[in-house]
Amino acid sequence: MLGLGEKPQVQGDLVKDATEATFMADVIEASQVVPVIVDFWATWCGPCKTLGPMLEAAVTAAGGKVKMVKVDVDQNQRIAGQLRIQSIPTVFAFWQGQPVDGFQGAVPASELKAFIDRVSALAGDGGLADAIAAAEDMLTEGAAVDAAETFAAILEEDPENAAAYGGLVRAQMALGNLDQAEGLLTAAPAAIAKAKELDAARAQLELARQAANAGPEAELRAAVEADPMDHQARFDLAAALLAADNPAEAVDQLLELFRRDREWNDGAARTQLFTIFEALKPQDPIVLSGRRRLSSMIFA
């Protein structure tokens, strides 16, 4: 788990050296998820000393859409032989276990960038969308630790991925780490600080804070039944219902409070409804129905 203020941990380097023992894992298996560029070189090769740093810089600039593995042909002759490497530098791009592109010799920076862009595009978003979906499934199934680790790994590949960042915040909330979740929101990169995924996470955090202080549902329900005009009891009952994972009835109670007195406590019912709508998914039936009913009251 991430501590407050910690950054997601690196899940493997973008550039690494491979050996015959690690080639299968570093290239063949790794390329199932993200394209891997393999640079075949040797210490005595002059052009390799020029191309290598240029290639590393281009891979790093791609921000995780592609990885690079360096293979010293003198130290790994069997690999070089299997791939029929006849001159160096030779560069191959692997995708889903197969060589799909490549070139020989030193090339200009413009051609190198075009090569990187071409290889990066092979995986579309680099498989991150599938990884995010998998992490969301983990979170839904209650595997919050696994979800947090997966979201963190995605952020290592794409630090400004709003969906993964919001997911990491929600995973921390699921683990009961509300302070850590708040710290992550505070430290969010400026480029995604106002993204809808982070707004949703903020709304969920606000509701989670309220839930931690919610009163007994049975007592609050009895108070509302005894006095339907006890607006505070109805508002508190909605909070207790949210804490009990019953957002549908919480929305019902807040809509009833709004119907009875829309200006109570500076419009607290409407504000709380908007917070709930923000926290839930936009197409959630509770949100769609709740927004429609609220609008009918406002514009009646």
Image (cartoon, rainbow, N blue to C red):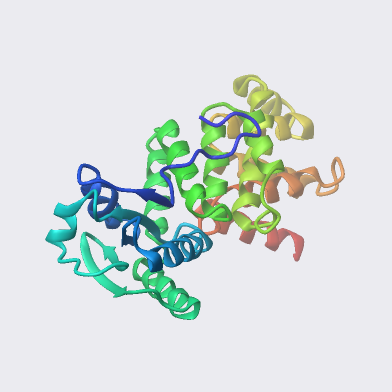
The answer to whether 164 is drawn above or below residue 97 in the figure is above
The residue drawn where x is 48% and y is 61% is 53
Is 132 placed left or right of 101 in the picture? right
Q: Which of 212 and 63 is in front in this view?
A: 63
> Which residue of the protein is positioned furthest toward the front in this rendering?
44
The residue drawn where x is 39% and y is 71% is 121
The answer to whether 89 is drawn above or below residue 273 in the figure is below
Is 194 placed left or right of 231 in the picture? left
| x and y, in percent, of residue 34 in the image | 35, 58
Q: How many marks?
A: 0
| x and y, in percent, of residue 160 in the image | 58, 55
The residue drawn where x is 16% and y is 63% is 83
| x and y, in percent, of residue 58 in the image | 49, 65
Is 179 placed left or right of 117 in the picture? right
Kindly indicate the quadrant of the structure image that contains residue 115: bottom left
Q: Quadrant of the C terminus?
A: bottom right
| x and y, in percent, of residue 264 in the image | 84, 42
The answer to whether 150 is drawn above or below residue 71 in the figure is above
Residue 128 visible in the displayed image: yes
Kindly indicate the quadrant of the structure image that contains residue 82: bottom left
Is 25 placed left or right of 231 in the picture? left
Q: Nearer the viewer, residue 28 or 215?
A: 28
Residue 245 visible in the displayed image: no
